[in-house]
Image: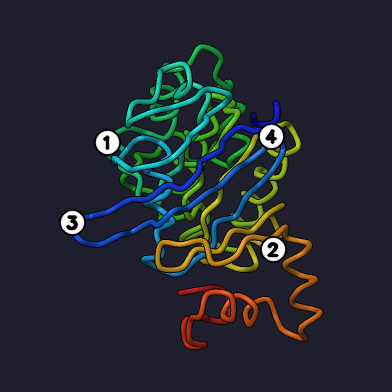
């Protein structure tokens, strides 16, 4: 029996590509008004985990509950999908549509979307609303993809490396929007390479290495454990995942 505020719970999820096991018995839960950061190096299985939870690829699991409904197989009912927002690491949109046209298009898929003007204002897109998506910078494209992910006011939000390619100002603006979403009851799964991003946003931090959960802590426990051991967050991450020191830069995991 799961708690009433649990939006997602998966037990023992595994995914294999050919002879390679990409995910091995991963368990994860997320509650309303909670940000769970999934942290790990390239190839750890973070994006595959999101794809598996969304039914974008076939995976094996002992149990999967989404928004209070038991899910089996790869299909996700339409009523569930309408309450889930997704921002993937690589987003593909029509390069010949303007920013406003993109948001109008995706908003029409939902019954009660946010007003497009409000969405553009929140995501700092008003000044580029008439520009073609294909002409935007990488950071601007990320903002459009984020706006699409939140346009339906989702209960559960998946963000896969959302701040990739963003400048410092835009990154902090997105962090504030994520905090607002959490405060309004949204549950958020955030994958990131960046320890500072996880430290700023996460209520819980799940570290994945080689397809397995290497450690799982509340963010407060993560910081306390580092302090008790006289380690930086980077050093604790390395000791938890067994990665060499060269795997980290000064800003995050590479």
Q: Quadrant of the N terminus?
A: top right
- What residue did someone put label 4 on? 32
For disc 3, the marked residue is 18
Asked whether disc 1 touches disc 2, contact meaning CB atoms under 8 Å apart, the reply is no
**Label 4 – label 3 distance at C-alpha:** 36 Å
Mark toward the start of the polypeptide (4 vs 2): 4
The tag earlier along the polypeptide, 1 or 2, is: 1
Label 3 neighbourhood size at 10 Å, few (<14), some (14-19), many (20+)?
few
Provide the residue designation for mark 2: 199
Can you tell which mark lies on residue 20? none
Quarter of the image where one finds residue 153 = top right
Whether tag 4 and tag 1 are in contact, CB under 8 A, the answer is: no
Classed neighbour count for the residue bearing mark 4: other residues with Cα under 10 Å, few (<14), some (14–19), many (≥20): many
Which one is nearer the viewer's eye here, 26 or 102? 26
Of marks 4 and 1, the one in the foreground? 4
From the viewer's side, name the closer residue of 156 and 119.
Answer: 156
Q: Which mark is residue 96?
A: 1
Q: Residue at x 52, y 60 (%)?
A: 192
């Amino acid at each position: 029996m799961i708690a009433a505020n649990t939006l997602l719970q998966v037990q023992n999820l595994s995914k294999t590509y050919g002879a390679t096991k990409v995910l091995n018995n991963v368990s994860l839960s997320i509650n309303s008004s909670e940000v769970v950061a999934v942290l790990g190096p390239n190839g750890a299985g973070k994006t595959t985990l999101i794809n598996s939870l969304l039914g974008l690829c076939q995976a094996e699991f002992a149990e999967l509950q989404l928004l209070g409904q038991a899910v089996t197989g790869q299909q996700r009912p339409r009523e569930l999908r309408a309450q889930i927002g997704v921002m993937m690491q690589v987003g593909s949109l029509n390069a010949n549509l303007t920013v406003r046209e993109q948001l109008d298009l995706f908003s029409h898929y939902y019954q009660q979307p946010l007003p497009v003007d409000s969405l553009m204002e929140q995501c700092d897109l008003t000044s580029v609303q008439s520009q073609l998506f294909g002409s935007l910078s990488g950071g601007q494209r990320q903002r459009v993809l984020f706006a699409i992910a939140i346009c339906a006011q989702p209960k559960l939000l998946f963000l896969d490396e959302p701040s990739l390619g963003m400048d410092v100002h835009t990154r902090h603006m997105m962090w504030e929007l994520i905090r607002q979403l959490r405060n309004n009851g949204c549950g958020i799964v955030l994958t990131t390479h960046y320890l500072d991003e996880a430290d700023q946003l996460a209520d819980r931090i799940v570290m994945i290495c080689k397809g397995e959960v290497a450690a799982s802590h509340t963010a407060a426990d993560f910081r306390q454990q580092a302090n008790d051991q006289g380690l930086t967050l980077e050093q604790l991450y390395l000791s938890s995942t067994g990665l060499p020191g060269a795997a980290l830069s000064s800003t995050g995991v590479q």
